[in-house]
Image: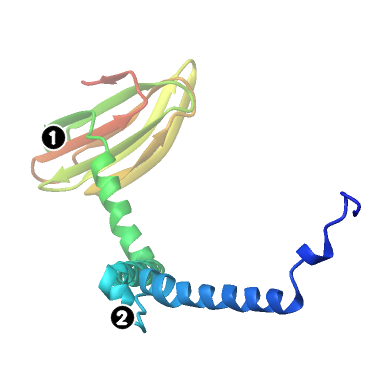
Amino acid sequence: MHNGNKPNPDELPTSAQLIKSTILAAVAAVAILVTVVLPSEYGIDPTGIGKAVGLAEMGDIKVQLAEEAEADRLLGLQNTSTIEEQSSLGGGFFSFFVGAAYAQTTEPEWTDQYSVTLTPGEGIEVKLVMEEGAEAEFLWVAENGVVNFDLHGDGGGNNISYAKGRAVEEEEGVLTAAFTGNHGWFWRNRDGQDVTVTLYVRGDYSEMKLP
């Protein structure tokens, strides 16, 4: 009799049996690798068995898909690099035109336009009603001659002259109201023929006062 908790020495495998089992397992693993894994995963079929059972075709497809995926990845990196290079080289140039196009599309139209023909010696005044600090863009043009002008303001006991000119054909800029009141232009034709003055304005004002 022997202790039930211990195996019978006669039942244990011998060293030769262990070595034989290890060798058989290794041979089986190699056989599986050569006949199954290599053909099905990498398209490598040294024995021809993979082709016979369809595993080699599966492996070829996997390899082809992997190659295509890598090619797509490399192409994507190349395209990204090209775009970044073009952006760094021509970004300023491109941005200039985009900015210009944006400015043109977002630039508001003139809110008001007024045109008057002055005979020799005749003068006229146009004012904008503005709050203190308000701004209005303007452009005026004298056609067929030149005029003298005075850009000024008044209101609430205040008076100011922003700019004056003699024999001027045109002027443009931004009028910023120094105080709440009326701000605008006085033109006089000192030429020897009729002169037409056309004024364009837009901005922060509530009313244009005409003669």
- Asked if the residues shown at circle 1 and circle 2 are in contact, with their CB atoms under 8 angstroms apart, the answer is no
Question: Looking at the image, which residue sits at the far front?
Answer: 1
Disc 2 packing (10 Å; few <14; some 14–19; many ≥20): some
Q: Nearer the viewer, mark 1 or mark 2?
A: 2
Q: Assign a secondary structure to mark 2.
A: loop
Disc 1 packing (10 Å; few <14; some 14–19; many ≥20): many
- Residue at 19% x, 47% y: name it: 146
Residue 170: where, in percent of width, then height? 24, 47
Question: Looking at the image, which residue sits at the far top?
Answer: 156
Residue 165 visible to an observer of this rendering: yes
Camera-side residue of 188 and 170: 170
Q: Amino acid at mark 1?
A: Leu
Residue 14: where, in percent of width, then height? 75, 74
Q: Quadrant of the C terminus?
A: top left
Q: Is residue 26 left or right of residue 117?
A: right
Q: Earlier in the sequence, mark 1 or mark 2?
A: 2
Q: Amino acid at mark 2?
A: Gly
Q: CA distance from mark 1 to mark 2?
A: 104 Å
Q: Assign a secondary structure to mark 1.
A: strand
Q: Quadrant of the N terminus?
A: bottom right
Q: Provide the residue designation for mark 2.
A: 48
Q: Note whether 204 is above or below 40 in the view shown.
A: above
Snapshot colouring: rainbow
Q: How many marks on residues?
A: 2
Residue 190 visible to an observer of this rendering: no
Q: Is residue 27 left or right of residue 183?
A: right
Q: Provide the residue designation for mark 1.
A: 118
Q: Note whether 84 is above or below 134 in the view shown.
A: below
Which of the numbered marks, if any, corresponds to residue 64? none
Quadrant of residue 19 within the rendered picture: bottom right
Q: Is residue 74 left or right of residue 126?
A: right
Q: Note whether 42 is above or below 210 in the view shown.
A: below
